[in-house]
Amino acid sequence: MVWHVSTRDDRAFNDIFFGIRDAADQGAKVTITLEEINGSALASPVVQMLSGLPNGKELLISLALAGLSTDPVTSAKISLRSSKVNDSFTLDGAALTAVPVPAALPLFLSALVGFGFVARRRRTT
């Protein structure tokens, strides 16, 4: 299965979470691979392997995207492969976490404004 992940409004995200149930419960191995970010293939794909899980087992999978791209992540391509044809799995509760505005940015901007006022005051006196 190939899963193309993106938001409707092209907002950036930095984590992908989803639940997977009944994966690798019939002696199969399930491979989850993060292959692309923003339409570009990763030089070193992120791979998670699942194997030997009991029937009905549910897992929360988290794929962290921080540091994998210099640009804000707006889309990703994930593949899920099972080593056996008769093993199936279900995805549920997929969610993306938005990239937060760093707290340092407003602080930095207010410092620049403060330095501007100080410089202006020095010039007028």
Image: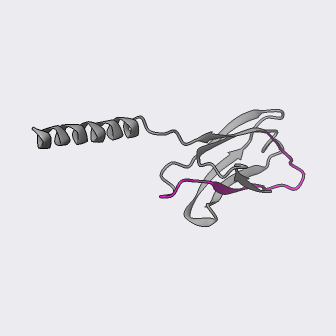
| Residue located farthest toward the front when viewing the structure as drawn | 124
Q: Position of residue 62 (x, y in %)?
A: 63, 41
Residue 124: image quadrant is: top left
| Count of labels in the image | 0
Q: Residue at x 83, y 35 (%)?
A: 55
Q: Nearer the viewer, residue 52 or 93?
A: 93
Residue 118: image quadrant is: top left
| Residue located farthest toward the right when viewing the structure as drawn | 86
Q: Bounds of the magenta span?
A: 69-92
Q: Is residue 90 magenta?
A: yes
Compared across the picture, whether 47 is left or right of 93 comes to left
Q: Position of residue 101 (x, y in %)?
A: 48, 39
Q: Is residue 124 magenta?
A: no
For the N terminus, the image quarter is bottom right
Compared across the picture, whether 113 is left or right of 36 comes to left
Q: Position of residue 123 (x, y in %)?
A: 13, 44
Q: Residue at x 66, y 52 (%)?
A: 10
